[in-house]
Amino acid sequence: MRGTVLFLLRTAIGILIALLAAVFFLLADNAPSLPNVPFAGIAITAGSQTVHLPNRIFRCDQVAQQVQCNTTLQNQTLSLTWQQSGNAPPTLSRCQALFAGKPLQCSDAGMDYIGRKGPLSYYQLEGLGLSQSQLRDLRRQYGWSNALSQIGEARLLQLSTAVALLTGVLVAAINWFYPGRLAEAFVSFAAAAGTFVLVWRWFGSVPYDRLTGFGISPEIWTGLAPSLALLAALLTGIVTARLLEGRFRRRDRIGPILITGAGMFSLTFVSLPGLFQTFAPLNSPSLMNFAPLLAAGIAAGVGVTTIGLLWVYSDRSIRTFLCMGSGLGVFGLLSLLFLISLLELGYAD
């Protein structure tokens, strides 16, 4: 029975990994944030129909203060031209559009933050003269781009958090039935990641005026802080791995256990806001103000539980810690990966 359950769990994880890879490919292929595309998105409007075009189909060139982007729709050339001013990011104005050589109405339909490129505008095109069947063909051709536009930022964040949670639960279940060296290595890495975030946040909160008294410039500190955080994370990973291997005598465990507990506390604390946003109606100011306190309380519980389980150091307590740590680690790290990906690709701001 145990072997059957383990097989089913591993199969589910394999299917989930394949689906995640496919989702990441689709997100990257339809990403709003592309190096040479100076807008957030282009949509065609005709009556009640709206078709969103993926940014990847446009080829953009800049000549002096003019930007021109071209693509082909229904075997006809769509050309967009703007006047550009400023830098980082440049400001576009006076949108002019041609389709099959005929002028179109091109209007600014709003603005959004697109990855590192900052605020960019959406543009809406009208008057292409395409039939309803041609518009439906375009919608089918660029189906994923239109589907992602309909889903929107909030739902993408919620779906990514839900997938990260499901993956974490499956990994935790596997490590309950079959704890091993791989689980120990991953939990050590998860604790190290939590310490990295904790130390980097602490160093990042140090006012620059205090640093200048020690002869440290803001530029030096900007490079030094992540290096110190990485060093602390490396120490945590080594200490946690040695703890799980039973390398410390009981009287020598207190310091290493506290270090591991702090790492798990930090990882839990930074992972919970996305979970709250997914499963709780946090639109009211009172709930939004209460969420950090709730996250801190749960994270403190995880930290204390980590300390207790590692102090007891029985087969059952270590298995429980590996189950908890691997589940939280997968959830936290995968949530962070999703968030960074959505931000960099331009789906979230």
Image (cartoon, rainbow, N blue to C red):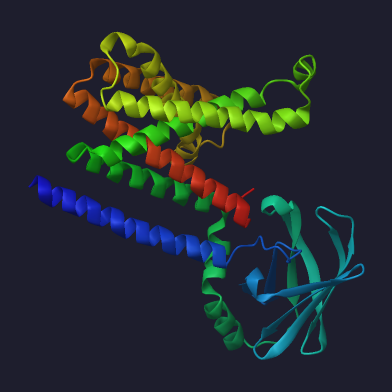
24 or 125: nearer the viewer: 24
Relative to 142, say whether 277 is above or below. Answer: above
**Residue sitting at 74 percent across and 51 percent down?**
118
Indicate whether 176 appears above or below 63: above
**Against 172, is 62 above or below?**
below
Residue at figure coordinates x 68%, y 54% from the top left: 114
183 left or right, relative to 53:
left
Residue 56: quarter of image: bottom right
Q: What x and y, as percent, mark residue 290?
A: 52, 24
Question: Between 155 and 203, which is closer to the camera in this rendering?
Answer: 203
What residue is rendered at 54% in x and 80% in y? 141
Up the image or down, 25 lies above or below 198; here it is: below
Residue extending farthest to the front is 247
Give x and y (percent) for residue 84.
88, 64
Of the pair 299 and 177, the residue shown nearer to us:
177
Measured as percent of width and height from the top left, residue 228 is found at: 59, 27
Q: Residue furthest top?
A: 251
Residue displayed at 81% across by 52% down: 88
Q: Position of residue 334 (x, y in %)?
A: 44, 45
